[in-house]
Image: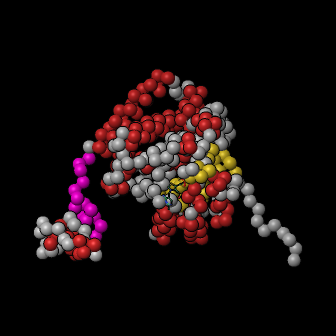
Amino acid sequence: MPRETVYNAKIERIQILDEDGNFDAKLGKGLLTNEQVVNAYEQMTICRHLDEIAFKLQRSGRMGTYPQNKGQEANPMGSAMAMVKGKDWVIPCYRENIAMHLHGLPYHYILLHWMGDERGNQIPKGVNMAPLSVPIGTHMLHATGIAWSMKLRKEKDRAVITYFGDGATSEGDFHGAMNFASTLQVPVIFFCQNNQWAISVPREEQMNSPTVAQKALAYEMPTVQVDGNDLFAVYKATKEARERAIKGGGPSFIEGVTYRLGDHTTADDARRYRDQAELDAWLAKDPLIRTRKYLEKQGAWDDKKQAKLDERAQKIVTEIVRAAEGIEAPKTNDFFDHMFAELPEALRRQRDTMRTSSLGQDPSQIGLQGRSAPETVEAGR
Ligand SMILES: Cc1ncc(C[n+]2csc(CCOP(=O)(O)OP(=O)(O)O)c2C)c(N)n1
Ligand SMILES: [Mg+2]
């Protein structure tokens, strides 16, 4: 038996706009108009303002917890621009505020989610999106399922994009979603935001492969690595993946290499496990600075425009916070009203008595007659 190579592979990396604002005119030709880039820059700036305010809301006790998007904005921005609002589906993780907003979710829904208000997860009708997902990896299966339904229903010209982190690719759910998507050849784009960290675990400890993109090779999926802080590269890769998907070419994988400039969440302090030098190096690669440099070179941006934008962003963010905090208080009955078509008897009693123990729910029992139950009876409950 001879020895022979049965599989050869290579992973391409795309970068069009580097960190100094240099633009690869050949690769980037005709990709985005200045108007589109200005709009993207404005969106990313508004998102950054919101991010900073959300952090302060948590610190001042007005929000439970919050994961900053800071530094990663070009990934969701460039990719969401390449998808079609109202047609495609977006299945997010929790660092894709811009993508959710661009595809129709009002920003205050995201704040409500992190304030612990379920209404933040109630996606408005007509918005093709799942609520943001904190359980790592579970939602990628939903993305594959939605794409499968598109295929079964013979819905042309639609695709799904799902976002997840580098750490999520160590989950079994990730591999299940990838395998089903590949064997069924469904129109889904797996977009990994490789931000180098899974809470305090660095990428090199999380996986032995030098790229995340190569994980898709096992599923025979077209796969590419892009500079995830480069709006143009992200847009190009996603556009190509979408075109392939709607032509029946099946799923694709994109690794957007970026960096989490903030802590994992407001419950974390990244200074305890990562070097300031590493953070400084990535601060210089910030997608907002880079996009602004590009626009300035194009003569499409200046300090005056920046000052106006910052002022506008502040007003917009103030309105978003007002909408979230101004929402009427939920009714206690809401707990019961949205889960079952017909409320089971035990829950009906809980609702009517606001007590959870079967003893307390029965008004004929001592618990509701103002007398406390004997120790021995209570202890058995
Ligand atoms: C199923 C599951 N396991 C563990 C956790 C706890 N957890 C929250 S975020 C996180 C790390 C995720 O890292 P990554 O996928 O790289 O996303 P990032 O936070 O870097 O954007 C973990 C382990 C969780 N939320 N869900
Ligand atoms: Mg990560």
In-front residue for pair 363/58 = 363
Most frequent secondary structure within the magenta stretch? loop
Q: Along the horizontal axis of the image, is 131 left or right of 171? A: left
Q: Along the horizontal axis of the image, is 350 left or right of 119? A: left
Q: Kindly tell me whether residue 282 is visible in this rendering.
A: no
- Quadrant in which residue 355 is drawn: bottom left
Furthest toward the top, the residue is 304
Q: Along the horizontal axis of the image, is 35 left or right of 12? A: left
- Please tell me whether residue 1 is drawn above or below residue 211 in the rendered image: below
Image mark count? 0
The residue positioned 69% from the left and 57% from the top of the image is 209
- Quadrant in which residue 53 is drawn: top left
Q: Position of residue 180 (x, y in %)?
A: 56, 69
Q: Is residue 70 magenta?
A: no
Q: Position of residue 191 (x, y in %)?
A: 56, 54
Range shown magenta: 327-343
In-front residue for pair 165/296 = 165
Q: Along the horizontal axis of the image, is 112 left or right of 76? A: left
Q: Is residue 340 magenta?
A: yes
The residue positioned 32% from the left and 38% from the top of the image is 319
In-front residue for pair 163/129 = 163
